Amino acid sequence: MAQAKGNNALGKLGKLTELRQRILFVVGALAVFRLGSFIPVPGVNPDAMSNLVNGSGLMDMFNMFSGGALERFSVFALGVIPYISASIVVQMMGSVVPSLQQLRKEGEAGKRKMTMYTRIGTVGLALFQSFGIAVALQKQVAAGGAPVVYTPGFGFVFASVVGLTAGTMFLMWIGEQMTERGIGNGISLLIFAGIVAGLPGAVVQTLNMSGNGELSVLMLLIVVVVVLGVTAFCVFMERAQRRITVNYARRSGGARAYQNQSSNLPLKINMSGVIPPIFASSLLMFPATAASWFGSGTDAGWFGSTLQRLGQMLTPGEPVYEIVSATLVIGFAFFYTAIVFNADETADNLKRSGALIPGIRPGKSTASYIDAVMTRLTAVGALYLALVCFVPSFMQKFWHVPFYFGGTSLLIVVVVVMDFTAQVQAHLVSHQYESLLKKANLRRN
């Protein structure tokens, strides 16, 4: 009896071997990512660089995505932002350019070509961004008068471009390996790790502010309630669906015997996910950073002051930034939803499968109805994204919260955790079905 129980326990462990290996691979890859974020690019004053980054709200957000690698100016300072920007651009062009539209229909071969274009775009963006950052840093001076770069010149620029580009390409490769050999989306997990890495320090800093009297106990409790409430709201909205009833007419026997079966067509409120906030913040991040850096380091008189004012207006919390950011998020939400969801194609699939929506004619009428429903859902989802992206600026400006909570970071954390949990559950369910097939002797040896 004891031997039988031991064999059952070993059998259960054996079923989870693949899942355990995948999780361990993800943990190991994230450990490599965190170690690499502490390898600096040579030639930079670390204290001056840290003061420069922490003095800008926009750079604080970019530093958070890289897991603190930017303030240390490590080889992973750019993070995976160039890869994300390139993949979004390629995906959007895939719905506009006819040749890329054809590639999307070619299955695995077309997918490999699209991936190749994304990698090429990643290299181009990483080269451009690393060169711009290296050139701008040479003109920066810390608050105490110490230069950020010890020895400006071609050597520093070349080392920075090579180091930052190589770091981005390595993160792109390791993210793809995590997707293939691990659990969940590798690129999203890397961003998730960078965001979560800063949470312990933010919690300790907040508690210290409360202990020093800078943040009252009542305000601390309000912040905790807001954090929990916004997180619960994001989870609710990410799970929210509009289910359209669909009827299927199926033959059940005989020449004229039919049986109606009902099903649902689920439509998510936020079909675009976290892409609109990421793309909007990427578009705002680089012109604002360039304006603030080049404006503070130039002696061009009115030109320099103009760049400084532009950099200040595009800082989180400023009215211009909030208006432009909300407009971009809402616009990209509609645009990206139109790319990933095609009402005409969905209506054609329903018509071919013999399904219809009660009270709606098949074909064009069905497509128009689905498109109208999706438009209303996207409007709600876009307003939800814009509202959540406004939370961190509000908390930092009016409540003086010493950390960046909400917006893109919160959405990424919620979506990644939900996706990771769903994939683990799917893996466990697949093993349960496998054991059932074994017991029923339906599995082929």
Image (cartoon, rainbow, N blue to C red):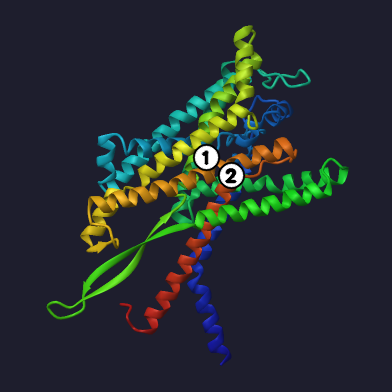
Above or below, 177 relative to 138: below
Query: Is tag 2's residue or tag 1's residue first in the polypeptide sequence?
Result: 1
Residue 166: tell me if it is visible: no
- The residue labelled by disc 2 is 388
- Residue lying at the far left in this picture: please name it: 255
Q: Which picture quadrant has residue 339?
A: top left
Comparing labels 2 and 1, the label whose residue is closer to the camera: 2
Circle 1 SS class: helix
Question: What residue is drawn where x is 54% and y is 41%?
Answer: 386
Q: Amino acid at mark 1?
A: Pro
Q: Which residue is mark 1?
A: 277
Q: Position of residue 255 (x, y in %)?
A: 12, 78
Residue 380: x, y in percent?
Answer: 48, 47
* Residue 204 on image: x %, y %: 78, 47
Query: Which of the 4 image quadrants contains residue 163?
Result: top right
Q: Is disc 2 in contact with disc 1, using a CB cutoff of under 8 Å?
A: yes
Circle 2: element type? helix
Residue shown at 69% from the left, 47% from the top: 199
Quote the CA–CA distance across marks 2 and 1: 10 Å
Q: Residue at x 53, y 54 (%)?
A: 237
